[in-house]
Image (cartoon, grey):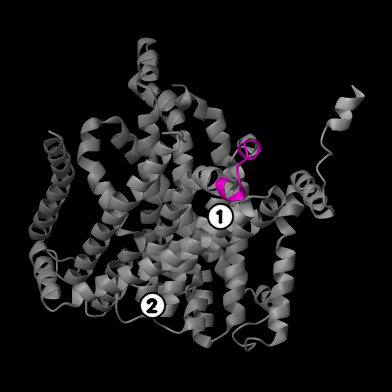
Amino acid sequence: MIRRARLTAAAAFVLPLLALLAIWEAVVRAFDVSPRVFPSLEPVLEAGAAAIADGSLIRHIAASLGRIALGTAVGIALAVPLGVAMGTNRAVSAFFTPLLRFFSVLAGIAWIPIATLWFGYGFGAITFVIFNAVFFVVAYNTLLGVTGIAMPLRHAAASLGASRWQLLTEVLLPGALPNIVTGIRTGLGFAWRGLIAAEMIATNVGLGYMLFVARDFYRTEVIVLGMIVIGVLWLLIDRLLLAPLERATIERWGMVRAA
Amino acid sequence: MSTVAAAAPAPLAVSPWQRLLGVYVRWSSRNPWLATVLPFVPVIVAWAAIAKSGLFPPVFFPGPVEVIQKFGTLMANGILPAYLEDSVVRLAAGTAVGMALGIPLGLLVGMSDRAHRMLWPVLLFFQAIGDIAWLPILLIWFGFGLTTMIFVIVYTVLFPVVLNTVLGVRSVPIELHRAAFSLGASKARIVWEVVLPGALPNIMTGLRNGLGFGWRALIAAEIIVGTSGIGFLMFDARRAGSVVEILLGMIVLGVLWYVVDSWVLAPIERATGERWGLVTRKD
């Protein structure tokens, strides 16, 4: 029963996208659009098959995903402890909030020029851009989350004899978790765009590079293929990883949020 | 009574450090403006000290004094104001178009079940492609110019606005529709006086998110398209190896965005949330 319901939902989701493909094909044919402006469906599929066959698509995807995984993991691993540490004390958090806010509004793409200068064109600069997009946004949101925990909750735990460690693992972290997850989702959104932009500018492998090189040769079918791959990858990351995580934390910890 | 008082534990010892922290909390809540600026003072001092110490070569890591001097020269010769104006005008134009398209589309998708079934997956997919991935094909279509940049910003702002408007429209309780309808409101009036105000907090959230993504997209577009603007200033400086100008560009962006976000967008979002938000939170 559940499986059937899921299948129906999946079909309802895929059907409009298939309709879009049909419209695309029909429009390109009807108006005889030049392949240098927009490709029809078939060359894109062929380009996809060719890129899979010679392994280049897998290589580009692996490069992009590897960078984003590394930058995100390091960013979260550093940001959460730092955010919690700064959030535990009112004065410390009042002091650091404007700083983190400044860096989190700046996080991501604006760092590309200086990152490429410090680390050179390549892996280091791109991973740094991803890292700082995730780091500052997550740290800022963790700080907000910890600061937002009602003082009576902390006092209650403390007067019931909770140790510092228990206070951390049973009050502060769970209380800040919805904010942390929201921060991860926003930060990853910035990081993903930063990744594509940085790859266009500063490397020779990755999805952004694949798109940008195809532009030099007016190979629109490769560009469209790359855009579809980017869209599908992000949909998968967002729907399968981030949205369930966000839902689970909000449901689990009973945070009520407007719609 | 006196014995009880004597048995009571001694008041918790408050160290001078804790007292200082307490003073800072009270002071910062009374002077929010100063409390925003103050934390940057030690950062700038530390930056100056590191730059001065010669730990990194000064070409790679200039100090705040050089950046301020650069700010002075670029203001005086008019480059910075002109580039800043270019960037802000692009962002404003793109945002205006994005909102003008996004809110009606969001109302349509939010209010009509059929439109929602058909368009929601498509919207999610196009949102997932992301603004910057459009740059290569836009460059083929429109060349290196204003149209490309505006298109990217419209695209970036559009989706957060549409998706949040849909959420907002769907969060308006059906009872309010029915109440307005049975009081004789026309369809247009229901949209104008029930749906739109009810969705307003979400629309503002969408606008704020969209602008957050939008100015990043603008920077990327200016770097890649490269004719003028703050992004161009930074990347041109990078080509020339002038870290001073890059840092200046980042600081200008950061300050500008900090001011816009926390003194314009966040208060609007909060105000609409307080003014209209109660309607959606009643249940």
Q: Quadrant of residue A64?
A: bottom left
The N terminus of chain B, quarter of image:
top right
Which amino acid type is shown beneath numbered disc 2?
A: Ile
> Picture coordinates of residue B175 (x, y %)?
37, 17
The C terminus of chain B, quarter of image:
top left
The residue drawn where x is 69% and y is 51% is A94
Whether residue B146 is visible: no
Q: Residues within 10 Å of mark 2 (few under 14, many from 20)?
A: many
Q: Quadrant of residue B154?
A: bottom left
User: Looking at the picture, does residue B63 appear above or below residue B87?
Assistant: below
The residue drawn where x is 28% and y is 47% is B123
**Would you say the magenta stretch is mainly helix, strand or loop?**
helix
Front residue of A131 and B61: A131
Does label 1 lie on the same chain as label 2?
Answer: yes
Distance between the Cα atoms at labels 2 and 1? 28 Å
Q: Circle 2 is placed at which residue position?
A: A201
Q: Chain under label 1?
A: A
Whether residue A226 is visible: yes
Q: Which mark is residue A140?
A: 1
Q: Which mark is residue B156?
A: none
Magenta stretch in the rendered image: A157-166
User: Looking at the picture, does residue B175 appear above or below residue B26?
Assistant: above
Which amino acid type is shown beneath numbered disc 1?
A: Tyr
User: Looking at the picture, does residue B76 appear above or below residue B200?
Assistant: below
Left or right of B178? Residue B273 is: right
Front residue of B68 and A202: A202
Front residue of A11 and B94: A11
Q: Residues within 10 Å of mark 1 (few under 14, many from 20)?
A: many
